[in-house]
Image (cartoon, grey):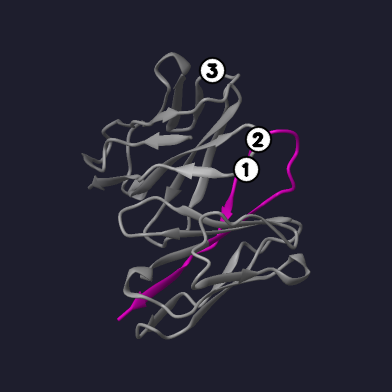
Amino acid sequence: AQKVTQAQTEISVVEKEDVTLDCVYETRDTTYYLFWYKQPPSGELVFLIRRNSFDEQNEISGRYSWNFQKSTSSFNFTITASQVVDSAVYFCALTEGGYQKVTFGIGTKLQVIP
Amino acid sequence: EAGVVQSPRYKIIEKKQPVAFWCNPISGHNTLYWYRQNLGQGPELLIRYENEEAVDDSQLPKDRFSAERLKGVDSTLKIQPAELGDSAVYLCASSFPRQGAGGGELFFGEGSRLTVL
C-alpha cells in the first residue's frame, strides 16, 4: 500500500523567510510519481509539480524548489523568500506506476505573516 | 479554457435528507475523480471514472453513496440518506487521458462543502 506522511501540520513564518515542507512516502513499486499541490483558502487544489521515480534531479521554479531523495523516501518542498500569497495548505501526493489512484498526505498549513 | 466546474458550492441539509453534487470536467479529460476532504485532512478518493466506466469505486460507501457519469462527461455524486459524518468538502477532479504509465496532474474544482445537521 502506498502512504504519504507530512509530519508538519502547521508552519508559521515571517514574510521573506525561507521555509521547507517535508514529505516522506512509502511504496513497494519501483515506478511511481510524486506531486505537490497547493490549496489556497478558496479551496481549489492547484498542481505545482510532478516528479517520477527515475528522475532524482532537483528542480527549481522561481521561488519554489523541490528536493527528491530516494534514499530517504523524501520529496521536500522549499519556498524561498516567502510571501503572504504563499499562505495555503500544501499537499504531497503519490501515484504508483500504471495506476492512477493518487494518495494524498494530510497537508501542511503554511501561514506567512507580513 | 474553463476549469472544472462544481455545484453547489455550499449545501446545508438535515440528516437523512438526500443531496447531490454535480461536476463538469475540463473538455477532453476522460478521467474524472470524486474525492472527499474532511476538515484538516487530505483528499480521499471515492470513485474514479474512465469515460463512462467506474474503474475504481472501492472507497465509495455504496449503501448510501452513488455516482454516475452518463455520456462520459458530466458526473453526479449522490448521498441518500446523509449522515452527520458526511459533512465534508466533495472535490471533483479531472485529468488528461493516460499517456504511458503513471498519473498525470489533476485539475480540481473548487469543491462542494456539505454540512449535515
What is the x, y in percent for residue A92? 43, 39
Chain letter, disc 2 residue:
B
Question: What residue is shown with label 1?
Answer: A100
Label 3 crowding class (10 Å Cα cut-off): few <14, some 14-19, many 20+? some
Label 2 crowding class (10 Å Cα cut-off): few <14, some 14-19, many 20+? some
Res A21 quadrant in image: top left
Chain letter, disc 3 residue:
A
Q: Are marks 3 and 1 in contact (CB under 8 Å)?
A: no
Q: Using the image, determine if residue A66 lies above or below residue B111.
A: above
Q: Is residue B83 visible?
A: yes
Q: Amino acid at mark 3?
A: Glu
Chain letter, disc 1 residue:
A
Q: How far apart are the alpha carbons under marks 1 and 2? A: 6 Å
- Pair 2/3: label in front: 2
Q: Using the image, determine if residue A69 lies above or below residue B43.
A: above
Magenta stretch? B92-117
**Sequence-first disc among 3 and 1:** 3
Q: How far apart are the alpha carbons under marks 3 and 1? A: 21 Å
| Residue ID at (52%, 61%) | B60
Q: Indicate the secondary structure of the residue bearing disc 1.
A: loop
Q: Are marks 3 and 1 on the same chain?
A: yes
Nearer-the-camera pick, A85 or A1: A1
Residue B90's mark?
A: none
Q: Is residue B115 left or right of residue A34?
A: left
| Residue ID at (42%, 29%) | A25
What is the x, y in percent for residue B75? 65, 69
Q: Is residue A33 left or right of residue B117?
A: right
Question: What residue is shown with label 2?
Answer: B102
Q: Amino acid at mark 1?
A: Gln
Nearer-the-camera pick, A9 or B67: B67
What is the x, y in percent for residue B73? 73, 67
